[in-house]
Image: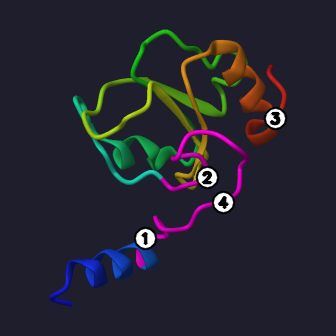
């Protein structure tokens, strides 16, 4: 356990951060479980305790209108996250990355059903 590579491997196995689902082409985070990044107002995993989806929007320009009963919307910034916004499934895997509202509206139904 004195080797950084061994520690990283074991940690990824325990936390399933190393698992990457095939969600199609796109950002490197797509399909990966997002680690507990530090935000200006706390930590990511604190926000995910509800068991709902989460849109972490670093731009403050997006909306989850129509899915607000299933997806929490948080505007916050992380120096550790190189993406304008990420849509997370309840298990913490990244289902969408971007900053385009129409693209987000296309990504929400497969994971969270039709809009209300």
Tag 3, which secondary structure? loop
The label nearer to you, 1 versus 4, is 4
Is disc 2 in contact with disc 3, using a CB cutoff of under 8 Å? no
Task: State yes or no: discs 1 and 4 in contact (Cβ < 8 Å).
Answer: no
Q: Which residue is mark 1?
A: 15
Q: Are marks 3 and 1 in contact (CB under 8 Å)?
A: no
The magenta stretch is: 14-33
Q: Secondary structure at mark 4?
A: loop
Q: Residue at the spot x=40%, y=40% of the render?
A: 47
User: Toward which corner of the image does residue 107 lie, by quadrant?
Assistant: top right
What residue is shown at x 35% (from left), y 38% (from top)?
A: 81
Residue under numbered circle 2:
31
Q: Secondary structure at mark 1?
A: helix
The residue tagged with tag 2: helix, strand or loop? loop
Contact between marks 4 and 2 (CB within 8 A): the answer is yes
> Who's the residue at 30% across and 26% down the image?
77
77 vs 56, left or right, is left
- Residue 95: x and y in percent read 63, 42
State the residue position of label 3.
113
98 or 40: nearer the viewer: 98
Q: Earlier in the sequence, mark 3 or mark 1?
A: 1
Give the labeled residue for mark 4: 21
């Amino acid at each position: 356990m004195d080797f950084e590579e061994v520690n990283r491997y074991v940690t990824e196995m325990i936390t399933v951060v190393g698992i990457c689902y095939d969600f199609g082409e796109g950002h490197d985070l797509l399909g990966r479980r997002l680690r507990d990044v530090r935000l200006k107002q706390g930590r990511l995993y604190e926000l995910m305790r509800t068991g709902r989806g989460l849109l972490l929007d670093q731009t403050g320009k997006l909306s989850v209108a129509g899915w607000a009963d299933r997806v929490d919307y948080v505007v916050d910034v992380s120096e550790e996250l190189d993406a304008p916004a990420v849509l997370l499934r309840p298990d913490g895997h990244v289902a969408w990355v971007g900053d385009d509202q129409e693209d987000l509206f296309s990504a929400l139904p497969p994971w969270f059903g039709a809009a209300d």
